[in-house]
Image: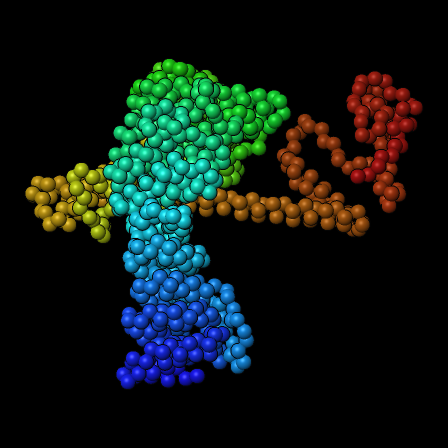
């Protein structure tokens, strides 16, 4: 069937009045295309529909045929080729848009059929029967066409025509719900058409079917989640939408008895909470904020308001979720300062504190133990935001006392669980997870102490909070064997509270005392390997150092205890092995401690690895700081020229008089200023353990303050030039003199550094020469030893060499004798008489002693006679000579060397 003929019949002016023929042709077309229209004919189909719309104004029979045609449009389109989808994509988009514009037809049947057809086309419905030679388009193509056609936006705009057709509006909402469930594009187009505002403003209207609120909330959820939260929230932040939400919420609170109704109530609370985050939302003006406060404090606070006089909770899961959502809404509303008056009138803080001790609400049906524990945690989390804003109510309700009591209960419960084998700090009792409750209490106390209120801080100290915090810290540390992250966070918060309490009060530092110092020393011994564990040890150590600064420094008694516990040594160990971002705090603490004269001896005594001294460590940190400050600059930071006053300033931006300049900020924030201050305490002379490089750096440190003062003057001159101001002549001369002084100081330091380097260079050369001399001497000795050994081996193997050696020895003896001879002296020959050699190869020499003819000679009867003895020993003695001894001495043998 050719659709062109149908169009010609409908447009032909001669057949304009032939309605029966028109209807006959249209019904024939419906029967012919009952399995779906072709892609290439879809444009003609919607042209026919538009012609039927014109004729339906006078004849309602055309609307029935239109419904039949639209019903076929809900079927998948048919294609002949695979490329048809891409070729006819634009035509299909325009056709779907025209389907949405057909909502202008006042017929309810047509509008309902349009919704049904769009839903069917967007869904997974397949063709009724297989058409030979054609195949239906894919589901992805249909979804894409619906998204790009903007039919969702058209349906939202068409709702303005449906004020008197509630049933049709529900079908439109259902269609929009289907389109928005899985499509971000459709949600965005609905938001673009102000869909959130249009839907919300009408959701509280009468609904005999009871589906209007449900459909509307589902659509609002989808638009907030997928269509852009900020834009959707902005649309909902007008008075009409807020009023509609308030009416819906109030109705659901008073009439939500079934679970489905209670779920709708909770969904409303979530949407209202999202809107409350927008500061422009008129929650207070509309009365919605007061309604939320009223319901949030029920049933803890008794009220005579008729809305809650007969209100009863079932304490089921949905009511529990409602209570949590209301507490969350209180937190969001607390960001608006205008809500504080409502919180005071509604006794919000009193209701929150009642959750800390649920046993006080006798006669009130309570939640289950698990629900009580959860609500207690939510109340503590809410108090972190609300309590600092309601300071008077906090003091009136004795918030400090209740929080300290809850902390004490949590501590005792944790000890009981540990003793009973339940794991300690993890037992779920009547009050829930004790460690989580303890964490919540500590966070609330930290928020209150941070306000700096003398009333709250003094009240805490009067109740013995310092001692309680110290005991809790040590108990947590002893139970933290597995090193849980929440435990470390609690200990960090407790140390911060102690720092805030003791910072400017000498009496509280004395109360901190020995127990507090023991705690600090224990945590300062934390291994440096834990800093990067990810559990928060780095924050714990940082808070420990801050606690030393706030709770120890300034009190002589506590400082002496800290020194006795070797706290300074631990701080220096942390300075050496800790991360770089802690150096400033540690150095600042050490600098404050150095005001105590006893500290300097500890600082001088400390030694690090390889005998590292404090001076060498500080100079090493100085060089590291220089490298970080001048990272990317090709400069030698150990030279005075690189750290001298900035005589060359590229761009100096003038700053207002009430703002510090860059030099002042650098001095206050830089690590170098703290290092210079510590050296000012230690002195710059006679520092042990310094190398030449350290002395070169020390020459810069010594002049640090001078450099900074001159740099400040250079900046002043640069600002004057940037502002085009010429100083008066005396001031200009003073600036020139200061610049000259800066140059002289720089050259003096540079000269001193050059002398140190040259001295070190000469010393290195001298040491190198001594080393080479020692090496040469060692080689010479080795050569002499080798020659001596070779000569010894030659004497033992060659008789000729041995005799030559003997001759040289005799010549040496002769040359060593004195040539002058006294006349009265007796000369003795060194020649051994009767020498003969036997067994040369065995190294045995037989020596004949004094000849026989001399035995009875002139020495025989004298007192000097030789006693018979081996040659290796023996001495001269005066006694009579015996013949047997002379005979024995006459022939004796000794081994030769």
Vertical placement of residue 45 versus 188, above or below = below
How is colour applied across the structure in the image?
rainbow
Q: In the picture, residue 273 is in which quadrant?
A: top left
**Which quadrant of the figure has residue 28?**
bottom left
Camera-side residue of 2 and 634? 2
Q: Residue at x 45, y 19 (%)?
A: 362
Q: Is residue 834 above or below residue 474?
A: below
Q: Is residue 251 visible?
A: yes
**Of all residues shown, which one is farthest toward the left?**
728
Q: Residue at x 84, y 37 (%)?
A: 895
Which image quadrant for residue 249?
top left
Identify the residue at horizontal 82%, vertical 38% (top origin).
896
Horizontally, residue 650 falls left or right of residue 449, namely: left
Quadrant holding the C terminus: top right
Please give the name of the residue rendered at 41% of the width and 47% of the height, measured from the top-left corner: 210
Q: How many marks?
A: 0
Image coordinates for residue 368, horizontal then vertical, percent: 52, 28
Residue 496 place in picture, x, y as percent? 40, 28
Residue 216 x, y percent position in the rendering: 38, 50
- Which is more toward the observer, 780 or 390? 390
Dividing the image into 4 quarters, which one contains the N terminus? bottom left
Q: Locate residue 722, reporting x and y percent.
A: 15, 50
Q: Visible in this render: residue 456? A: no
């Amino acid at each position: 069937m050719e659709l062109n003929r149908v169009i010609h019949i409908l447009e032909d002016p001669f057949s304009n009045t032939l309605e029966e023929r028109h209807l006959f042709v249209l019904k024939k077309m419906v029967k012919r295309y009952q399995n779906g229209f072709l892609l290439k004919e879809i444009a003609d189909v919607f042209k026919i529909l538009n012609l039927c719309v014109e004729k339906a104004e006078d004849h309602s029979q055309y609307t029935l045929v239109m419904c039949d045609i639209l019903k076929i449009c809900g079927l998948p389109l048919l294609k002949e080729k695979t490329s048809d989808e891409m070729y006819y994509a634009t035509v299909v988009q325009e056709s779907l848009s025209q389907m949405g514009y057909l909502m202008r037809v006042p017929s309810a049947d047509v509008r309902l059929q349009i919704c049904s057809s769009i839903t069917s086309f967007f869904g997974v419905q397949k063709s009724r029967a297989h058409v030979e030679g054609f195949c239906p388009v894919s589901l992805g193509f249909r979804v894409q066409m619906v998204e790009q056609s903007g039919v969702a936006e058209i349906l939202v705009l068409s709702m303005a025509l449906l004020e008197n057709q509630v049933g049709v509006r529900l079908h439109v909402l259902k269609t929009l719900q289907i389109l928005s469930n899985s499509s971000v594009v459709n949600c965005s187009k609905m938001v673009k058409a102000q869909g959130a505002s249009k839907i919300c403003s009408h959701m509280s209207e009468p609904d005999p079917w009871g589906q209007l609120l449900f459909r509307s909330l589902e659509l609002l959820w989808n638009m907030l989640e997928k269509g852009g939260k900020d834009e959707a929230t902005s649309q909902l932040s007008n008075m009409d939408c807020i009023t509609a939400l308030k009416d819906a919420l109030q109705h659901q609170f008073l009439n939500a008895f079934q679970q489905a109704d209670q779920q709708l109530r909770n969904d409303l609370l979530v949407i209202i909470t999202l809107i409350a985050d927008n500061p422009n939302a008129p929650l207070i003006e509309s009365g919605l904020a007061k309604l939320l406060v009223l319901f949030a404090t029920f049933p803890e606070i008794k009220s005579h308001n008729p809305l809650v006089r007969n209100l009863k909770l079932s304490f089921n899961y949905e009511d529990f979720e409602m209570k949590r959502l209301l507490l969350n809404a209180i937190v969001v509303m607390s960001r608006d300062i205008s809500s504080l008056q409502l919180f005071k009138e509604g006794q919000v803080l009193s209701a929150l504190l009642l959750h800390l001790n649920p046993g006080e609400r006798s006669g009130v049906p309570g939640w289950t133990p698990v629900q009580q524990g959860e609500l207690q945690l939510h109340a503590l989390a809410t108090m972190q935001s609300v309590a600092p804003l309601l300071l008077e109510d906090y003091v009136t309700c004795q918030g400090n006392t209740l929080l300290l009591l809850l902390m004490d209960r949590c501590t005792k419960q944790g000890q009981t669980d540990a003793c009973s084998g339940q794991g300690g700090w993890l037992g779920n009792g009547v009050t829930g997870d004790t460690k989580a409750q303890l964490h919540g209490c500590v966070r609330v106390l930290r928020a209150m102490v941070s306000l700096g209120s003398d009333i709250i801080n003094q009240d805490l100290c009067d109740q013995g909070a310092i001692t309680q915090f110290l005991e809790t810290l040590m108990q947590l540390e002893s139970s933290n064997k597995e090193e849980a992250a929440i435990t470390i966070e609690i200990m960090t918060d407790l140390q911060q509270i102690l720092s805030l309490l003791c910072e400017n009060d000498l009496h509280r530092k004395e109360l901190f005392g020995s127990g507090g110092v023991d705690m600090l020393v224990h945590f300062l011994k934390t291994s440096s390997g834990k800093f990067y564990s990810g559990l928060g040890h780095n924050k714990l150590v940082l808070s420990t150092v801050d606690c030393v600064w706030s709770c120890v420094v300034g009190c002589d008694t506590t400082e002496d205890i800290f020194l006795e516990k070797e706290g300074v040594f631990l701080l220096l160990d942390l300075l050496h092995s800790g991360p770089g971002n802690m150096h400033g705090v540690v150095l600042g603490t050490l600098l404050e401690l150095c005001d105590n004269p006893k500290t300097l001896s500890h600082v001088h005594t400390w030694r690090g690895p390889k005998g590292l001294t404090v001076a060498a460590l500080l100079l090493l940190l100085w060089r590291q700081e220089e490298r970080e400050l001048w990272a990317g600059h090709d400069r030698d930071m150990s030279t005075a020229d690189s750290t001298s006053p900035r005589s060359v300033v590229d761009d100096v931006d003038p700053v207002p008089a009430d703002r510090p300049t860059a030099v002042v900020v650098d001095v206050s924030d830089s690590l170098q200023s703290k290092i210079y201050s510590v050296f000012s305490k230690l002195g710059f002379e006679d520092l042990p353990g310094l190398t030449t490089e350290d002395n070169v750096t020390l020459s810069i440190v010594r002049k640090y303050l001078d450099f900074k003062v001159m740099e400040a003057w250079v900046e002043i001159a640069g600002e004057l030039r940037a502002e085009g101001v010429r100083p008066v002549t005396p001031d200009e001369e003073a600036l020139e003199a200061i610049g000259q002084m800066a140059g002289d100081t720089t050259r003096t330091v540079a000269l001193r550094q050059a002398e140190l380097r040259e001295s070190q260079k000469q010393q290195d050369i001298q040491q190198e020469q001594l080393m080479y001399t020692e090496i040469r001497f060692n080689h010479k000795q080795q050569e002499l030893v080798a020659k001596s050994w070779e000569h010894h081996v030659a004497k033992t193997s060659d008789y000729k060499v041995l005799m030559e050696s003997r001759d040289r020895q005799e010549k040496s003896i002769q040359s060593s004798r004195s040539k002058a001879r006294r006349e009265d002296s007796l000369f003795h020959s060194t020649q051994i008489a009767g020498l003969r050699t036997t067994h040369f190869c065995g190294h045995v020499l037989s020596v004949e002693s004094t000849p026989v003819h001399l035995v009875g000679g002139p020495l025989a009867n004298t007192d000097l006679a030789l006693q018979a003895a081996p040659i290796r020993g023996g001495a001269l003695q005066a006694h009579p000579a015996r013949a047997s001894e002379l005979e024995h001495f006459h022939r004796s043998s000794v081994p030769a060397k």
